[in-house]
Image (cartoon, coloured by chain):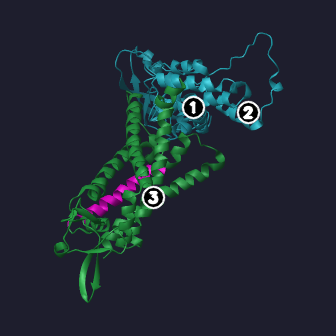
Chain colours: A green, B cyan
Amino acid sequence: MAKSAILKSSLAKKYWMALTGLFLCLFLVGHLAGNLQLIFSDALHFNEYALFMTTNPVVKLLSYLTYISILFHAVDGIMLTVQNRKARPIRYAKEDSSANSAWASRNMAVLGTLILVFIVTHMVNFWAVMHFDKNMPLQTIHITYQGQEMDMYVTTNDGKYIPTDLSNTGLEIRNHKEFYDAAANLKMAEGIKDLHKITFAFFKDAKYGLIATILYVIAMFVLAFHLLHGFASAFQSLGANNPKYNGLIKGFGKGFAIIVPLLFAIIPVYIHFFAK
Amino acid sequence: MASSKFININLKIWRQKNAKEKGKIETYRLDKVSTDSSFLEMLDQLNEQLVSERKEPVAFDHDCREGICGMCSLFINGRAHGPDTGITTCQLHMRMFKDNDTIFVEPWRSKAFPVVKDLVVDRSAFDRIQQAGGFVSVNTSGNTIDANATPVPKHDADRAFEAAACIGCGACVATCKNGSAMLFVGAKVSQYALLPQGKVEATQRVLNMVRQMDEEGFGNCTNTGACEVECPKGISLENIARMNREYLVASIK
């Protein structure tokens, strides 16, 4: 009895919705902190951070949890929406729902679907490129060595640089980022993928940069409305409703819903219009 | 009354012969409606007119007509119990409407509340939820103790009383975009869960009542808060949160 209750009942679906939603709120904070380095840090530091985020085992575990949460949140949301539609087979001829509820609260499914579309395109544009693109550029620096100006690849081995002109080094790049001694078939070093360059190129693109920026900002508006209802709603679903703290939860939720998407949105706007 | 005046209105009313046949919206013109009359009295007036025209009168639920029984329903102009808050339909007065207004009157729409005829719906789903656990199994055969012998904190007693004010009218279900009954069930769970007599069976009660609620085909709460606004008795969303808490604890026990 209790077992099926916690998995299948209407309330269980709400708990999962709330828990995955709140976890995704935490993810947003982490993701935002990383993204803000695009404004406040340089390319090398950003790319080193990106390397850490794609290789650290704890972060990897968290990222899998995030993927699962997104999927679960979406699937659970679809199931709830389907059930809720079935609960009213004949709609009202006239409905005045704005008289008793907020717009965002009534449109969570639509907002959520738009966010899912955004997440997919976002992952295609950046995540997939970072992980799988054969033409993913590697981080380089411009240095003066023995009076000679040259570009060097930065490697994960601190202080070890490799000339971008590999012709005299006997090295070749394998697996998009590994430097191999071709003759000895030995891995000598590992480059750092230049996600910073990709991101800047994406939003500064002469043809699509502006539309990408605009769509990104719109997506953040959608996210803001989703959070405007979702954040405080998650607490209610988990049973946390106490007049003593409700003001705090709702106030924090509203602040979160406005500030987090706003900061996210500032980044592509900054890149497109102001960054060099 | 000195302020009383008369208005003429257009009514768009859901007519459905019985549970099986398809219904549709019919339009009626009703003249000389006193603004002092209640919405139900206006419908009485319409029915008198229909009867005099040898037409079938509109079936609608009503009983006490003083806002306490929960029998009158009606989705009026897009809102449960019409364009006001904290009232039942019998407490809605025609002064809320203007001359020549068009007023939509529809039955509660919910899979769990099938239409019986016209505006009458079958709300026995609520009874079955109540029967699944909304009671205290006390042996009353001559050995009941004085109610005041069991101390109850004033705060809890007040919350339980507020929850118990639910008249089971179904406005929460009707107004919820998901057709969810969680305000009703939350109130019924709360009124017992808060009191020492009810705590004894709290675990089974919440599990059983929620299971019955799901079986009846009600939707899921998405916390829009519409039910709380439209509830004639001002039942708070706190009761849904309490049910969520009670159920969470009960289901992992």
Q: CA distance from mark 1 to mark 3?
A: 31 Å
Q: Which residues are magenta?
A: A207-228
Q: Are marks 2 and 3 in contact (CB under 8 Å)?
A: no
* Circle 3 Cα neighbour tier, 10 Å, few/some/many (<14 / 14–19 / ≥20): few
Q: Please state which of residues A128 and A191 is positioned toward the viewer in this rendering.
A: A191
The amino acid at mark 3 is Gly
Q: Who is closer to the viewer here, B217 or B10?
A: B217
The answer for which chain carries disc 3 is A
- What mark, if any, has residue B252 been given in the picture? 1
Residue A117 in magenta stretch: no
Disc 1 is attached to a residue of which chain?
Answer: B
Q: Residue at x 34, y 66 (%)?
A: A268
Which residue position holds label 2? B157
Using the rendered image, report if marks 1 and 3 lie on a common chain.
Answer: no
Tell me where residue B217 sits by quadrant.
Answer: top left
Q: Give a yes or no on whether discs 2 and 3 share a subunit.
A: no
Subunit of label 2: B
In what element is the residue under mark 1? Answer: helix
| SS type, badge 3 | helix
Tell me: A158 left or right of A250: left
Quarter of the rendering containing residue A196: bottom left
Which disc is residue A30 wearing? 3
Magenta span contains residue A221: yes
Q: Nearer the viewer, mark 1 or mark 2?
A: 1
Q: Name the secondary structure under disc 2.
A: helix
Amino acid type, label 2: Ala
